[in-house]
Structures are given as C-alpha cells and as structure tokens.
C-alpha cells in the first residue's frame, strides 16, 4: 500500500504519477475517507470519555440517594450517538483499506509512458538471431515425444504438459546450473512453500488486482503461488531487519501456477502460457536507497545467464501502465 502520509502531503504528485498507470481516479475518494476517519476518531474518543464521566455521576447520585434520571438519559443518548459513529468508522475504514489496497506502486520516472507491450522502451539488443537458411522447427517438433500435450489435456485440461526423458534431465540440469551460478553471485538457494496465505499475496501486491489469475484452495484458505517472489518476500514477514544485515539475497526455485485468465488464443501452441511451470527467481532485501543499484545488478546477472547460454536477447523497459501492481520499474529480457 502507498503511504497515506505521502498522499496527504503530495496529492497532486501522487495523482500525476498514478495517472501514468491509469489509477489516479481514487485518490480524491481516499483522501475524503482519510479525512472522515481522522474526524471520527477524536469524536469517538471524546464521546467515550464523556459517557464514562456521566456513568460515574450516575453511580455517585444513586449512592447518595438522589435522582439520576437526567444523567441516565444523557448516557443513553451518548451511547446511541457513539454506536452510530463507531459503525460509520467501521464502514469508512473498510472502504479506506479497500481503496488503498487497489492502488499500485508509483512508477519510477524512468519507466516509459504507455499501457501495452508496444509502449516498452528498447534498452539494448545483444547477439544476432541466427539465419539457418531453412524453416526451423518449433519446440514441439524438436522435443518429439519428450513433451506430451494430449495426455496432459486428458488428465488436467488445456495448457498442461508432461515432460519426459531427456527434457526432464535438461530442465533440472539448467535449474542446478542456474542455482550454482546465483549462489556464486551471493544468492542463497531456497525452495519455498508454494501454498501461501492471502496476506502474503496482499503484502506483495498480487491481490486484490490479480485474483482472477490465482488458483485458490478455499477450504484451506490458501493460494497456489504464481511466482516464488511471494513466499520469498514472506520469508522475513513480521520481522525487523537490521540495516547492517542487508543485503539479504535469495535464489528461489519452485513450481508456479497461473490461471492465465484472459489469455485465450494467445501463445497456445506447445508449452507457452501453461498453468504450471518451474522457475528460478532472484530476490533481494536491500536498503531503500540501494534498490535501484540492486535492480540493475539483478538485470546484469539475468543477462549473463542468457549470454552464457548463447541466446540472443533484447532488454526492454516496461511501460508504466503495463507494470504489475507492486512494481515501480521492470525490465524484461526477451530471448
């Protein structure tokens, strides 16, 4: 969530920044709710104090054998007014939290304007796409019976696959190689849990906005993580990290699960946009003032992975309106 103090002190700057993400409309409502909440809190506290004082007067009058009818009526009125204000506060705070949760992060000034893939800014291209002199086969043809799509569809439905034989060994060889490489770069390997609680998804910005992309186990009140970023971020949840202990760097390996809602007709061939896949991910806890440097460091490592594998690639700076909810800036490496 964005800091309410920042929104109060610099509302126009926040609006301008969120407008680049198409998310500025709710700032006025949020400020109005915040103002009403700050009005209600002292009023409720004052009414509680007044009710306590009147109740003490009633006790004293009754003890003295005197009439306390007026004071009792005043307490009834105070109680009624207090209940109304407390009910309003619950409503106001509920809506305030709801609006706050939907606001994305402020985009970095260096993120380009726009809302689609086409608006991304090309940073660099590395290597040349080879010219084979013939029509190359796609990954499904090359894999042969190493990828079983029809059997997976019978068992699990569309967008699932069996990997078999050499492809299994290739995947885990790549995973092992990647983890060893990242460990040499100072990232501790981690296999995190893939079932996470709702608060972990809210804390990392994947809820409420991406709810339709996430598999939910309602009976257990758990969700299948779409990226190990979620459990890795939660590794130090509810902890205070000492600055001297930073940076903390991790390399997570996990299976990931995504519903891919709204992706019908897009990249449906083979094992693109599948519902289940394995991924190695870098994650760092650093001081705020070191975040940009760390982001560039992680990008350099990712590029070195592609270069070591001999893959031509390009780096793009994702448009502000195309960023995930928690992101201020994002690079995509497209191989």
Image (tube, rainbow, N blue to C red):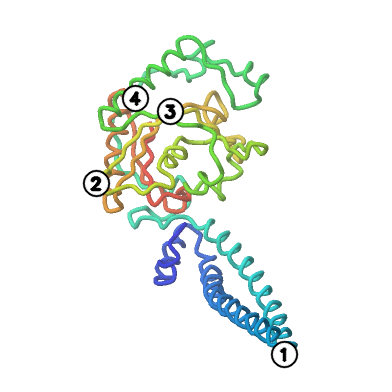
Neighbour tally class for label 4: few under 14, some 14-19, many 20 plus, Cα within 10 Å: some
Neighbour tally class for label 1: few under 14, some 14-19, many 20 plus, Cα within 10 Å: few
Looking at the image, residue 116 lies above or below residue 43: above
* Residue 301, position as x, y percentages in the image: 28, 34
Q: Which mark is residue 191?
A: 3
Mark 1 vs mark 4: in front: 1
Residue ID at (71%, 82%): 77
Q: Where is residue 81, by image quadrant?
A: bottom right
Q: Quadrant of the C terminus?
A: top left
Report the Cα–Cα distance between label 2 and label 3: 25 Å
Badge 1 marks a residue whose secondary structure is: loop
Neighbour tally class for label 3: few under 14, some 14-19, many 20 plus, Cα within 10 Å: some
Residue ID at (51%, 60%): 23
Report the Cα–Cα distance between label 4 and label 3: 14 Å
Q: Earlier in the sequence, mark 1 or mark 4?
A: 1
Mark 2 vs mark 1: in front: 1
Q: Are marks 2 and 4 in contact (CB under 8 Å)?
A: no
Please give the residue where the numbered disc 2 appears in the rendered image. 244
Please give the residue where the numbered disc 1 appears in the rendered image. 66
Q: Earlier in the sequence, mark 2 or mark 3?
A: 3
Badge 3 marks a residue whose secondary structure is: loop
Looking at the image, residue 256 lies above or below residue 321: above
Badge 2 marks a residue whose secondary structure is: helix
Instruction: Indicate left or right for 55 with 191 as reference.
Output: right
Please give the residue where the numbered disc 4 appears in the rendered image. 178
Report the Cα–Cα distance between label 2 and label 4: 28 Å
* Residue 165, position as x, y percentages in the image: 49, 9
């Amino acid at each position: 969530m964005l800091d309410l103090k920042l929104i109060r002190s610099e509302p126009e700057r926040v609006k301008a920044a969120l407008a680049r993400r198409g998310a500025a409309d709710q700032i006025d409502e949020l400020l109005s709710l915040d103002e009403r909440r700050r009005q209600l809190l002292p009023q409720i506290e004052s009414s509680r104090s007044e009710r306590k004082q009147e109740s003490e007067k009633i006790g004293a009058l009754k003890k003295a054998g005197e009439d306390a009818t007026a004071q009792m009526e005043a307490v009834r009125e105070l109680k009624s007014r207090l209940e109304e204000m407390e009910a309003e506060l619950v409503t106001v705070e509920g809506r305030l939290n709801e609006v706050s949760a939907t606001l994305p992060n402020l985009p970095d000034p260096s993120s380009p304007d726009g809302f689609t893939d086409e608006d991304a800014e090309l940073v660099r291209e590395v290597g040349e796409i080879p010219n084979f002199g013939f029509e190359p086969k796609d990954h499904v043809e090359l894999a042969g019976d190493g990828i079983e799509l029809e059997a997976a569809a019978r068992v699990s439905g569309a967008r699932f696959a069996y990997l078999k034989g050499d492809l299994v060994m290739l995947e885990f060889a790549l995973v092992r190689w990647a983890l060893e490489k990242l460990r040499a770069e100072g990232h501790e390997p981690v296999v995190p849990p893939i079932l996470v609680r709702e608060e972990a998804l809210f804390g990392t910005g994947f809820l409420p906005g991406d709810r339709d992309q996430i598999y939910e186990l309602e009976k257990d009140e758990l969700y299948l993580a779409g990226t190990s970023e979620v459990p890795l971020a939660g590794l130090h949840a509810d902890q205070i990290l000492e600055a001297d202990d930073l940076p903390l760097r991790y390399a997570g390996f996990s299976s990931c699960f995504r519903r891919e809602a709204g992706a019908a007709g897009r990249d449906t061939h083979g094992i693109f946009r599948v519902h289940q896949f394995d991924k190695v991910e870098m994650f760092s806890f650093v001081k705020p003032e070191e975040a940009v440097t760390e982001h560039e460091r992680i990008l350099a490592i990712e590029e070195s992975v592609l270069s070591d594998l001999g893959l031509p690639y390009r780096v793009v700076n994702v448009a502000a309106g195309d960023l995930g909810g928690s992101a201020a800036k994002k690079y995509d490496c497209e191989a």
